[in-house]
Amino acid sequence: MQNPVPPGNGKYQHGRTGISRVLHTLLHSRDGLVATFKGEAAFRQLLVLHGLLMVAAFLLAVSPVERAVMLAVCLLSLVVELLNSAIEAVVDRISLEHHPLSRNVKDMGSAAQTVVLLMVALVWVVILLGPAP
């Protein structure tokens, strides 16, 4: 049985090691992806957008490094949306009361996603326009 109070190092004892811990981590990751997919329309929209962009990256005549960068920025946007959704869930879990700090935190998460989407656009435009003559 798990101890409800973390030991002196501030971490709970999970009781799993090695491959068992890896497998359980993968199961929790799957659960997080499923929960985000079911509960967050923005994540579903980004999956469609980035799914189309990633397919396009394989169809375009670009170098392997350019393709890797195009794919990486798409995946980064999905990571930021997962983190943004997690932050919003924690803020809502603490309190549904409207509070300036809660609003700021949610706005910061949104701003992070906006910056990454601008990065996606910039990377794709620079790669697709190619080098200057």
Image (spheres, rainbow, N blue to C red):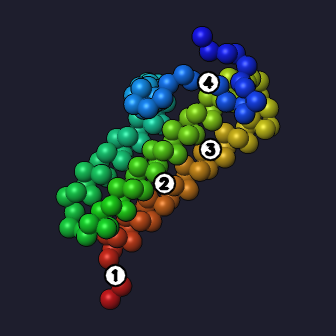
Q: Which mark is residue 117?
A: 2
Determine crowd level at label 1: few under 14, some 14-19, many 20+ residues with C-alpha closer than 10 A. few
Question: Which numbered disc, 2 or 4, marks the residue that appears first in the sequence?
Answer: 4
Image marks 1 and 3: residues in contact by CB distance under 8 Å: no
Percent x, y of residue 64: 26, 66
Q: Which mark is residue 131?
A: 1
Q: What amino acid does circle 3 point to?
A: Gly
Residue that mark 3 sits on: 109
In the image, residue 18 above or below residue 108:
above
Q: Nearer the viewer, residue 66 or 40?
A: 66
Question: Which numbered disc, 3 or 4, marks the residue that appears first in the sequence?
Answer: 4
Q: In this view, does 9 lie to the left or right of 69?
A: right
> Which residue is found at the position 33% from the left and 74% from the top?
129
Quadrant into which the N terminus falls: top right
Considering the numbered disc 2 on the image, is that residue within a helix, a strand or a loop?
Answer: helix
Considering the numbered disc 3 on the image, is that residue within a helix, a strand or a loop?
Answer: helix
Considering the numbered disc 1 on the image, is that residue within a helix, a strand or a loop?
Answer: loop
Q: Is residue 63 left or right of residue 47?
A: left
Question: Mark 3, mark 4: which one is toward the viewer?
Answer: 4
Q: How far apart are marks 3 and 4 (CA)?
A: 30 Å
Q: Distance between the residues labelled 4 and 1?
A: 54 Å
Q: How far apart are marks 2 and 1 (CA)?
A: 22 Å
Determine crowd level at label 4: few under 14, some 14-19, many 20+ residues with C-alpha closer than 10 A. few
Picture quadrant where residue 3 is located: top right
Image marks 2 and 4: residues in contact by CB distance under 8 Å: no
Q: What amino acid does circle 4 point to?
A: Gln
Question: Mark 2, mark 4: which one is toward the viewer?
Answer: 4
Toward the top, the furthest residue is: 1
Q: Residue 13 carries which label?
A: 4
Percent x, y of residue 20: 42, 26
Q: Distance between the residues labelled 2 and 3?
A: 13 Å
